[in-house]
Image (cartoon, helix red, strand yellow):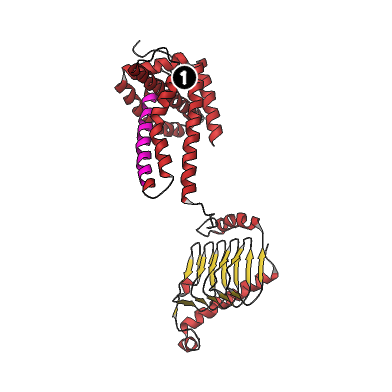
């Protein structure tokens, strides 16, 4: 019982270790409303349509204002009014006869905007081919303006990072479907794969630490688990997979029974402790078998456990390493990682079964 309490403490440590508008804005909003109404009138009156200078295809009214999704004005498209996007990105490649307004997203302009271009809570990327007759304004983001871009009015950038944090909660409160600012910093694919490799390395280091600690304090229990795995392999495997299958139903059962709800955290702590203890047992078993095959005698139990750990984790580790360059290496590395995951998962389940058979290494199975 003393050993079990200590294991629970170790697993608990593991779990802990891993886990306002201005008057000008109001005026602009009123003007936006008026302009949208104008678009409706233009749609219904062919005479007014003929007075317009642009001959390109007119976008539907529903495409002029978007809430919770992106809007792209293609090169062959013309919006005869304002292009307004709330909680999404606005890309202007074609023509916008009114203002281009983006709130809670990023604004990209490589085409023509007759009025102002405004972005709130996002970034403005203006290409060299862009023409903006009015002002260019960014609130809570940055302006990236390429050489050759023409802005007829003033260029204003107000850095308010808090805007980008507040907008997602505001959109959620008012019920706009897409939650969160859609801007994400660019991370190179190689950097992402390198991060995955780093996480794999951290996982292995953490496992080494816990395996060595369990060997240090519970060597006798680990040997009993190892004996059950080696001499009753199929029973250990069956017990482990059955144990894994009943975890979720047992949790649901405790949740249904009101008095069982406080026991759910205890159940999962015991399960995690058992899985880690079983992993140490299967690692020790693999190391012991390897030592006998090689004729090694009197080898340290720590060394045997580390040998087994390397055997279990080496394939997934190599898969993460091979995938870093990308291209065909990413495909090959991904397949190797899948194989490594399968091997690791089977090892974890067999070890867990050994723990179940020996009741956390408290007794030798079969006696």
Residue 316 visible here:
yes
Residue 264 visible here:
no
Residue 161 position (above or below residue 351): below
Let me know if residue 341 is in the magenta part.
Answer: yes
Residue sitting at x 42%, y 28%: 310
Picture coordinates of residue 212 (x, y %)?
A: 49, 22
User: Main structural element of the magenta stretch: helix, strand or loop?
Assistant: helix
Secondary structure of the residue carrying numbered label 1: helix
Instruction: Please identify the quarter of the rendering in which residue 181 is found.
Output: bottom right
Residue sitting at x 54%, y 80%: 38
Q: Nearer the viewer, residue 68 or 260?
A: 68
Name, please, the residue furthest toward the top.
367
Residue 7 position (above or below residue 102): above
Q: Residues within 10 Å of mark 1 (few under 14, many from 20)?
A: some
Let me know if residue 187 is in the magenta part.
Answer: no
Picture coordinates of residue 97 (x, y %)?
A: 54, 79
Magenta region, residue range = 331-352
For this view, does 119 lie left or right of residue 60? right
Picture coordinates of residue 321 (x, y %)?
A: 43, 40
Q: Nearer the viewer, residue 105 or 152?
A: 152
Residue at image mark 1: 302
Picture coordinates of residue 119 (x, y %)?
A: 59, 66
Residue sitting at x 35%, y 32%: 343
For this view, does 334 lie left or right of residue 81? left
Name, please, the residue furthest toward the right.
23
Q: Nearer the viewer, residue 115 or 145?
A: 145
* Quadrant assignment for the C terminus: top left
For this view, does 269 lie left or right of residue 341? right
């Amino acid at each position: 019982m003393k050993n079990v309490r200590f294991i629970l403490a170790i697993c608990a440590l593991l779990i802990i270790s891993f886990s306002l508008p201005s008057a000008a804005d109001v005026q602009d909003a009123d003007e936006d409303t008026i302009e949208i109404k104008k678009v409706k009138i233009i749609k219904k009156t062919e005479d007014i349509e003929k007075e317009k200078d642009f001959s390109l295809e007119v976008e539907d009214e529903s495409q002029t204002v978007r809430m919770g999704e992106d809007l792209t004005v293609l090169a062959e498209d013309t919006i005869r009014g304002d292009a307004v996007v709330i909680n999404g990105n606005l890309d202007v490649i074609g023509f916008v006869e009114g203002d281009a307004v983006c709130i809670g997203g990023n604004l990209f302009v490589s085409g023509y905007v007759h009025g102002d271009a405004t972005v709130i809570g996002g970034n403005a990327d203006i290409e060299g081919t862009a023409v903006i007759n009015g002002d260019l304004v960014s609130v809570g983001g940055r302006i990236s303006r390429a050489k050759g871009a023409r802005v007829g009015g003033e260029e204003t950038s107000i850095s308010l990072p808090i805007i980008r944090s507040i907008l997602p909660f505001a959109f959620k409160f008012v019920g706009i479907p897409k939650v969160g600012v859609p801007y994400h910093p660019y991370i190179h694919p190689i950097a992402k794969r390198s991060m995955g490799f780093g996480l794999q390395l951290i996982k292995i280091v953490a496992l080494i630490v816990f395996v060595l600690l369990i060997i240090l304090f519970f060597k006798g229990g680990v040997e009993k688990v190892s004996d059950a795995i080696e001499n009753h392999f199929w029973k250990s495997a069956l017990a482990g997979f059955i144990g894994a299958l009943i975890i979720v139903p047992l949790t649901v059962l405790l949740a249904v029974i009101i008095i069982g709800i406080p026991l759910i955290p205890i159940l999962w702590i015991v399960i995690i402790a058992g899985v880690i203890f079983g992993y140490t047992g299967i690692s020790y078993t693999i190391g012991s078998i390897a030592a006998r095959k090689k004729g090694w005698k009197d080898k340290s139990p720590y060394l045997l456990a580390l040998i087994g750990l390397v055997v279990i984790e080496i394939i997934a580790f190599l898969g993460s390493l091979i995938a870093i360059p990308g291209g065909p290496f990413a495909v090959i590395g991904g397949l190797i990682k899948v194989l490594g995951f399968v091997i690791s998962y089977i090892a974890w389940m067999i070890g867990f079964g050994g723990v179940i058979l020996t009741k956390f290494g408290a007794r030798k199975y079969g006696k």
